[in-house]
Amino acid sequence: MKTLNISVGLVTAIGLLGCANGNGPNGSVSLSFAGRSANVTAAPAAFSSPAGSSAADVLVITKAEVVLRQIELKAVEVANCDVVPKPENCEEFQTGPVRLNIPTTTGASTQVTVDIPPGTYKEVDFEVHKLTTDASEAAFAAANPDLVGKSIVVTGTFNGQAFTFTSDLDVEQELTLVPNLVITASTTSTNLTVQVNLGDWFKTTTGTLINPATANKGGANESVVKENIKRSMKAFEDKDRDGNEG
């Protein structure tokens, strides 16, 4: 087992470990996050109800933060990384909790860069994590007291009125890579982007906007928005880091 090299952008480095699953030199893989789809051009992220809708609501997201932990790549031959001891072909980007600022502008923001061995990887896994004050997270919680008991914080305006949305969503996300990410002995570097489509978080099934204030703890739309968040993420190879597939 060896210590991986890490370059951290907006997150705090906590020890990263990886195990070789192939022969040959390691390839450098960066993990980036994007917060909007290709058809959104406004900055900051601005969304409106669909054309023809009786509502004329406008949502502007100025900041979106998520707490993540246990970020890893899963090789094709691995059925489950959540076992002890962890299979050698589960490559960890980050173990402890990190505070991720999802971009509201275009493009993807690189968070972590690691060296991984040659192999074929099928999935990016991570936990959207409600921060606790447990011993294993005490230091991080002390440095981020505003996040204790939360996993997501979003600020912005809805019809011109300021809002703060928070969630205690605690869920594992398993994002399939289509096509698989292939690292060969000649691969020098590449990038994976997790696209978190912020525009889908505060919408009904018909596309009408939801007032984020109604989705806070105990609110009428709490469960709707939690489900939207879980469905809003996908991952893909993104060599030019523009935040879009292809």
Image: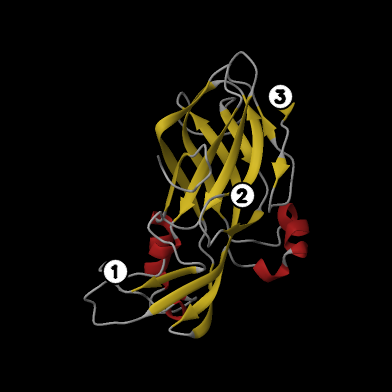
Furthest residue toward bottom: 161
Which type of secondary structure does the marked residue at label 2 adopt? strand
Residue sitting nearer the eye, 184 or 204? 184
**Image location of residue 241, percent across then percent down:** 53, 44
Q: Amino acid at mark 2?
A: Arg
Which type of secondary structure does the marked residue at label 1 adopt? loop
Judge the density around disc 3: few (<14), some (14-19), many (≥20) Cα neighbours within 10 Å.
few
Relative to 155, residue 185 above or below: above
Q: Determine the CA span between mark 2 and mark 1.
A: 31 Å
Furthest residue toward left: 52
- At a point 65% along the width and 17% down the height, the residue shown is 25
Q: Determine the CA span between mark 2 and mark 3.
A: 21 Å
Which type of secondary structure does the marked residue at label 3 adopt? loop
The numbered disc on residue 69 is 2
* In this rendering, the label closer to the viewer, 2 or 1: 1
Q: Please indicate, yes or no, whether residue 216 appears anywhere in the rendered image.
A: yes
First along the sequence among labels 2 and 3: 3
**Image location of residue 70, percent across then percent down:** 60, 44
User: Which residue carries the number 3 mark?
Assistant: 1
Judge the density around disc 1: few (<14), some (14-19), many (≥20) Cα neighbours within 10 Å.
some
Q: Quadrant of the C terminus?
A: top left
Q: Quadrant of the N terminus?
A: top right
Q: Amino acid at mark 3?
A: Met
| Quarter of the view holding residue 64 | bottom right
Furthest residue toward front: 41
* In this rendering, the label closer to the viewer, 3 or 1: 1
User: Which residue carries the number 1 mark?
Assistant: 207
Q: Amino acid at mark 1?
A: Gly
Q: Determine the CA span between mark 3 and mark 1.
A: 48 Å
